[in-house]
Amino acid sequence: MRFYSPKFRMQGRKTLKLKALGEFKLIDRIREQASEGEGVDRGIGDDAAVLNLPEGHQLLTSTDLLIEGVHFRHDWTDCEALGHKAVAVNLSDIAAMGGSPRYLYLGLACPDEAEISDIDAFLRGVLDETAKYGVSLVGGDTCRSPGPWMISVTVEGSAPRDQAIGRDGAQPGDLIMVSGTLGDSALALRLIEEDKDAHTSLLKRHHQPVAQVELGRLLGENHLASAMIDVSDGLAGDLEHILQASQVDGLIEEAELPLSEEFQVHLGKAPALLELALYGGEDYELLFTVTPDQAPSVRELCAARQFPVTTIGYISKGSGLLSLKEKTGEARPLLVRGYDHFCRT
Ligand code: ADP
Ligand code: MG
């Protein structure tokens, strides 16, 4: 994930600072707001959470860090949206395994000057997002930060034994499919950075990404995807992860890339923006491969449930190379440049 963004400058009078409340009252506040859902024997308040998984399920776990100044800026985002997004990006990882998210842990480091109203707004976002999917906040850690806010979210989910879908199962002949549309979040970010107006639908894709939990579970339950990943770092970069893990090549067709109406309007004026659909991050769509036999079932089930999915290419024998077939019909290798926190060339 990259920088958040824009136009939610925080306004209004602030009153209570974290240093006046203290760690334990803050944890009490969190505990009061968190509801304990299914499977929770002990949630917040003990040394460790005591949880249950459905019989025969395996545990899926994923963690993400969000650092102020790296992933978000308070002058560009609103704390409630930040809470939503912090959870959604984690749920997306469980969705990408074809599992069901169940439990969430929240590590929170804030400066002692942080406003309680901001922390409350953040928690509201976190708890709203967890509630949507029946996920319980069952623990975490809270401490003082010498400066930036630091947020660590861990989500645990489950899937029946041997149902979890990895990145390494793509086979020559499989079709490459993706849900939703690509590049909207990156386009919103580009417009924000350039201080240009962005349509609400684009901003929403950036600030309030939606994890494709239902679709992931549907594909998992029905054993319909041979490999799957969520698009967090950009289509090309994430597809390359599948290709390398599976040791196959992939070809995607420019003409088939699913683009939103808003994206197409911008693309019409500036064709170079296509790179945002290929390399832009934070789509949080599901990218998966399907055997030709199962493709009709995927299309049928997804149409019945109104999950938009598009076939964008196919897998062939190889060693991890990705190519793009342009609208002219010519294929060229795609240089993959997914987001790398340490190499920013
Ligand atoms: P410990 O000293 O054992 O780490 P803490 O005092 O940090 O215990 O935490 C007490 C309880 O509150 C634990 O159950 C912990 O999981 C929970 N907790 C602490 N911080 C958070 C948080 N930010 N969100 C959710 N639960 C939290
Ligand atoms: Mg602790």
Image (spheres, rainbow, N blue to C red):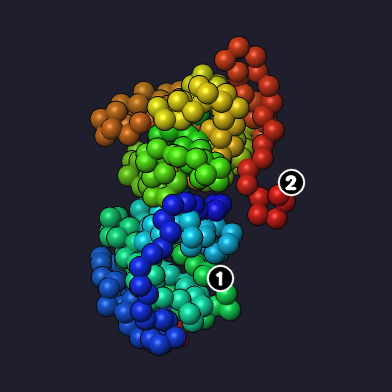
Q: Quadrant of residue 286?
A: top left
Q: CA distance from mark 2 to mark 1?
A: 25 Å
Picture coordinates of residue 1 (x, y %)? 54, 52
242 relative to 36 in the view: left or right: right
Count of numbered marks: 2
Q: Residue furthest top?
A: 328
Residue type beneath disc 2: Thr
Q: Is residue 326 among what the camera can see?
A: yes
- The residue that appears at 49% across and 67% down in the rendered structure is 151
Q: Which mark is residue 210?
A: none
120 is higher (above) or lower (below) than 298 = below
- The residue that appears at 67% across and 29% down in the rendered structure is 334
Picture coordinates of residue 87 (x, y %)? 41, 59
Q: Which residue is mark 1?
A: 148
Q: Quadrant of residue 36?
A: bottom left
Picture coordinates of residue 80 (x, y %)? 36, 61
Query: Ligand 1 appears in which quadrant?
Result: bottom left
- The residue that appears at 49% across and 28% down in the rendered structure is 266
- The residue that appears at 58% across and 79% down in the rendered structure is 146
